[in-house]
Amino acid sequence: MTGPETTDDRAAAYSRGVDAGRIEQRLQGHDEHLRHINGSIESMTQALRSLTEELRANVALFTAGATAARRDTKERDRIAEVRVEEAGIVESQRTVRWTAWQRGFAVVGAIILMVNFGLGLYVAFYR
């Protein structure tokens, strides 16, 4: 029963159509805005991924450097210990212990040397 519509019905239908057009236009605006936000989020995600990769690379370099330094320090300490042990062995082989009578002769010799030096000064300046 599609009969002639009244002008009020036509006006109401027109208003509904206009309102639907406005709503659709607003929804389209929202869709575009959401696409823009999604694009921004995607670019931020890419930036974060690249920063994460760069950070991982820097951490790997730092870790490798710290490990190498620790290894170098341990190696240097080990070499130093070996050299100290070798020096101790060589020193103990080179060190000669004096006996009691050798020490006594050294003390008597030092005393005679001092007396002679003193006598030499006395003769040089007071005679």
Image (spheres, rainbow, N blue to C red):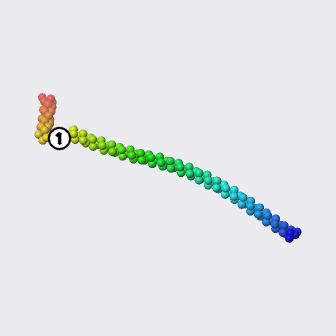
Q: Horizontal placement of 81 versus 114: left or right?
A: right
Q: Position of residue 19 (x, y in %)?
A: 77, 64
Q: Residue at x 21, y 39 (%)?
A: 93
Left or right of 40: which side holds 23? right
Q: How many numbered markers are drawn?
A: 1
Q: Position of residue 111 (x, y in %)?
A: 13, 37
Left of 35 or right of it: where is 122?
left
Q: Is residue 122 visible?
A: no
Answer with the quarter of the image where residue 112 lies. top left
State whether residue 98 is above or below residue 10: above
Say if 20 sits above or below 47 in the image: below
Residue 30 in sight from this viewpoint: yes
Is the residue 76 above or below the residue 41 in the image?
above
Q: Name the kind of residue labelled 1 in the image.
A: Arg
Q: Residue at x 50, y 47 (%)?
A: 57
Say which of 117 and 88 sits in front: 88
Q: Which residue is mark 1?
A: 97
Q: Is residue 44 shown left or right of residue 77?
A: right
Image quadrant in which the N terminus is located: bottom right
Q: Residue at x 14, y 37 (%)?
A: 106
Image quadrant in which you'd find residue 82 = top left
Q: Quadrant of the C terminus?
A: top left
